[in-house]
Amino acid sequence: MYQFNRDDYNKRMEWYQDARFGMFIHWGLYSIPARGEWIRSTEEMSIEEYQKYFDEFDARDYDPKKWAKLAKDAGMKYVVLTAKHHDGFCLFDSKYTEYKATNTKAGRDLVKEYVDAVRAEGLKVGLYFTLLDWYHEDYPHYGDRIHPMRNDKNCGNENRDFSRYVEYFHKQVEEICTNYGKLDVLWFDFSYDDMRGEKWGATKLMNMVRTLQPQVIIDNRLEASGEGKGSLAEGNPTPYHGDFVSPEQIIPPEGVKDVNGDPLVWEACITMNNNWGYHGTDKFFKPAPMLIKKLVECVSKGGNMLLNVGP
């Protein structure tokens, strides 16, 4: 069973604290409608309405080799790709769902292509995996704060078995920790309301992850979100504490510290415009000097910057 060890933790974090700059890539079915990665939720879109993007998906513009080279040329040291986002669509070939890239016109494992491309450029490999799943029938629908069907009384939760969903996503995490070689970063997203910690079966999950990928670096979102710090900051780390704090769209004015005032490892994830996934009308890109200033600010305060692109 995994238990926090300060010496092991410090050694695991060495490369990450030297890296300082990474690329975040949000890419999936939602890139087709080009209205952002939360489109199913923001437009309260049913699975049936969303299906047309699955049917259309062919990944013809998917180019991880080009993206990895751009990351390296920009001075980035690691890359994180959305292996699965909240819509439940998997870019990897999961044997536990039919809702995956290998069952589309693309017909191939896109995570494998990404992992190979990033390693070929000598960069560290990261995978993003959502804890949410708006496709799975056992994830809460009606009444959940953010589910696309949250306001549809016909989508009640009486016959849903959340434990079955937890078992499902644990098996998918096992797949990505087993089938793609050594992973350097595993980026979970995200806890909210009472959906946090042991609601996700977090101790069991982390014991598995730490067994399969003992050196992987994990964010804090099994117990927190972009606004929270988590138990590492509180001085009493849970087995699922995460290795770094993950402020979203902000740079903490004084960095991030624990209850004793000691600095914590942190990473600010920041978009280039106002969306994570591709948005066809969002042209409000931050100028390059501003992005450079943000990177310098992160590093000067002891943090990393994970700069997002939404191809």
Image (cartoon, helix red, strand yellow):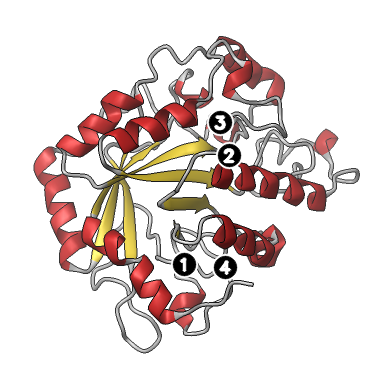
Q: Which residue is mark 1?
A: 228
Q: Closer to the observer: label 2 or label 4?
A: 4
Residue at left 40%, top 52%?
184
From this viewpoint, is residue 299 visible?
yes
Q: Residues within 10 Å of mark 3 (few under 14, many from 20)?
A: many
Q: Quadrant of residue 273?
A: top left
Name the kind of residue labelled 3 in the image.
Phe
Name the kind of residue labelled 2 in the image.
His
Tell me which numbered mark, 2 or 1, is placed earlier along the sequence. 2
Tell me which numbered mark, 3 or 1, is placed earlier along the sequence. 3
What's the CA distance linking mark 2 and mark 1?
20 Å
State the mark number for residue 92: 3
Name the kind of residue labelled 4 in the image.
Tyr
From this viewpoint, is residue 143 visible?
no
Tell me which numbered mark, 1 or 4, is placed earlier along the sequence. 1
Tell me which numbered mark, 2 or 4, is placed earlier along the sequence. 2
For label 3, the SS is: loop
For label 4, the SS is: loop
Q: Residues within 10 Å of mark 1 (few under 14, many from 20)?
A: some
Q: Which residue is mark 4?
A: 240
Name the kind of residue labelled 1 in the image.
Gly
Q: Which residue is mark 2?
A: 86
Image coordinates of residue 90 in percent, x first then y, are 58, 31
Q: Quadrant of the C terminus?
A: top left
Residue at left 60%, top 33%?
87
Q: Residues within 10 Å of mark 2 (few under 14, many from 20)?
A: many
Image coordinates of residue 40 in percent, x first then y, are 59, 30
Determine whether, in the image, residue 281 is placed left or right of residue 150: left
Q: Closer to the observer: label 1 or label 4?
A: 4
